[in-house]
Image: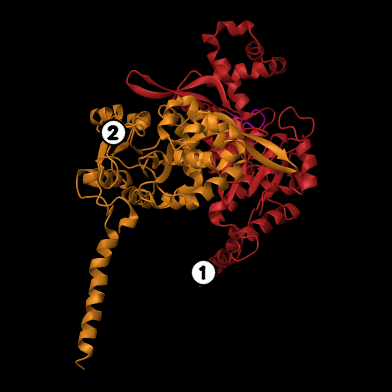
Chain colours: A red, B orange
Amino acid sequence: MMMFRPIFASLFGATLFVATVLPAIAQETLPSWSDGAAKTRILDFVKATTTEGGEGFVAPQDRIAVFDNDGTLWPEQPYYVQLGFILDRVKTLAPQHPEWKTKEPFKSILAGDLKGIARGGEKGIVDLVMSTHAGMTSDQFAKIVTDWFATAKHPKTGKPFDEMGYLPMRELLDYLRDNGFKTYIVSGGGVEFMRPITEKAYGIPPEQVVGSTILTEYAIVGDVPVLRRLPKIDFVDDGPGKPSGINKFIGRKPIFVAGNSDGDAEMLRWVTAAKGPGFAMIVHHTDAEREYAYDRESAFGKLDRALNEAERRNWLVVDMKADWKTIYASEH
Amino acid sequence: MMMFRPIFASLFGATLFVATVLPAIAQETLPSWSDGAAKTRILDFVKATTTEGGEGFVAPQDRIAVFDNDGTLWPEQPYYVQLGFILDRVKTLAPQHPEWKTKEPFKSILAGDLKGIARGGEKGIVDLVMSTHAGMTSDQFAKIVTDWFATAKHPKTGKPFDEMGYLPMRELLDYLRDNGFKTYIVSGGGVEFMRPITEKAYGIPPEQVVGSTILTEYAIVGDVPVLRRLPKIDFVDDGPGKPSGINKFIGRKPIFVAGNSDGDAEMLRWVTAAKGPGFAMIVHHTDAEREYAYDRESAFGKLDRALNEAERRNWLVVDMKADWKTIYASEH
């Protein structure tokens, strides 16, 4: 019998472990968030808005939560993910455009001179977007983007982009959804660039992505109806455009909003100025070692006036270094 | 004991009735639809797309169903509901606009001459929309619309508009939702005109309404951020605009689409041309007695080339008079 004792003991121990420790782990909320004021404020808000009969209760259909994407759900350094896509597209398309060898900003990109892009100014950026995002059908563009995400890697971490979502934010999305919130992305990025990846990266379906759009035109090619992407900006979902975008696409005012840069300031202010409950948070990039540290001077995701506003309006400023135990799921 | 016998019998009978007849009634699908080819085609399509392992199976997240509004879910005769709103708004605002007494198309409206509006042409209509739909904030406009719907009545039936939805279409919406479909409105009407009424009338929440939009501008009034409605059309969600609107707002191709006029033709064709299952139906207004009878010559909801297309492309044409037992819920 003696040989069975340890087996029995370990089986018993395992049972005890399963019965006591595991459920406690499973039930921990926002496990990648450090215990502290940031986590507590989030938990308190969700508790208040979901407690029936409570003063701050919000009916499930009105629990709309909106999240900026670049810098809020995944990194925007060393440059926006969509800019990485553009750079790769320019290289791919270059053989069909011999004129790019001498024309900015294409010339700089092909020479690997990223600073040269900035010299082209805003017109240069628009030229880049139009020459890489227009001229094909919506279906063709979705395939180009999907194919790109299948192989593209973040320049610093070397991870594919569907693994670049911040784990604490993914936990927050799940937590809000578990509490009856409907989660949306509201980003300055192109809506048709984001939609092929958001379900996999964040559990957010295409119809819950609000972003910048270019004009499309219905056309019959052969006998097949298609939507052609025209080289013309339709809507810029950034800054003051974000409240307009939310109003246009969603048609309800969110009660929870997360951003990280000045381009989110109007959205945060619009949400928190509304009557009734409204929670606004800013992800502050303070972790040069595990991610990046930047704010008031950054070329991408500049956080300056929104940081001033945050203090004045009591928005939660999340200190990435102190408040997040883990940055990426793959660290586990 | 004899006196208890009938009671017992009737109790027993009631139990029997509850156990056998009621469940059968409760389970009848699309009860306001006549048994026939139209109903059968709808049932067959839903069965095929929801039968796991079947050839035509569609995953729940891809079960998107889109519905035109005017003439498809509620009447568009004797004129569009939104035009009724405009006429009332012009009368309400007239005291602030003495110049309207001599300026078309306002003059005609104030004189009760509806035909005069037509003489103003498209520019007249745009002037009407701009002078009644712009110049206020989005919140103010939502309140104006909500207040109007609270008292407005259909000119022929005298019913409030949340009772003007066609019962067979409401049943169809419920049936699709019960089968995992997500239902959307895709209408040429103004999105902010429809959103305050669609939940009550059709069980469709604001974020599932796609429509025409006017530009909005973020502004600070006092210390309060608002969205100002500008007198400028942003997007016309009609005809070839409907596929673009679906692509922009929803970002998935629907598999079920319902319309009733030439303005829906491109949307129906775009959906049914896609690979995989696609169901298109047209509501044909054939019932002059219970509703209206019109098609190729109608000023509102002209159905001409879409009717030709329907035959060629095997779209279901619903004959309102023959296929619908009941038009409105209040007939019961």
Q: Is residue A63 visible?
A: yes
CB atoms of marks 1 and 2 within 8 Å:
no
The amino acid at mark 1 is Phe
Q: Position of residue A287 (x, y in %)?
A: 75, 39
The amino acid at mark 2 is Asp
**What residue is disc 2 on?**
B295
Residues drawn in magenta: A153-160
- Please rate how many residues cluster around mark 2, counting C-alpha atoms within 10 Å: few if below 14, some from 14 to 19, many from 20: some
Q: Quadrant of the N terminus of chain B?
A: bottom left
Q: Which label number is shown at residue A4?
A: 1
Residue at image point 23% right, 84% down: B8
- Callout 1: chain: A
Q: Position of residue A135 (x, y in %)?
A: 49, 18
Q: Which label number is shown at residue B268?
A: none
Find out whether residue B173 is within the magenta segment.
Answer: no
What element does badge 1 sit on?
helix
Q: Nearer the viewer, residue A77 or B10?
A: B10
Residue at image point 27% right, 28% down: B309
Q: Is residue B307 above or below residue B71?
A: above
Q: Nearer the viewer, residue A17 or B233?
A: B233
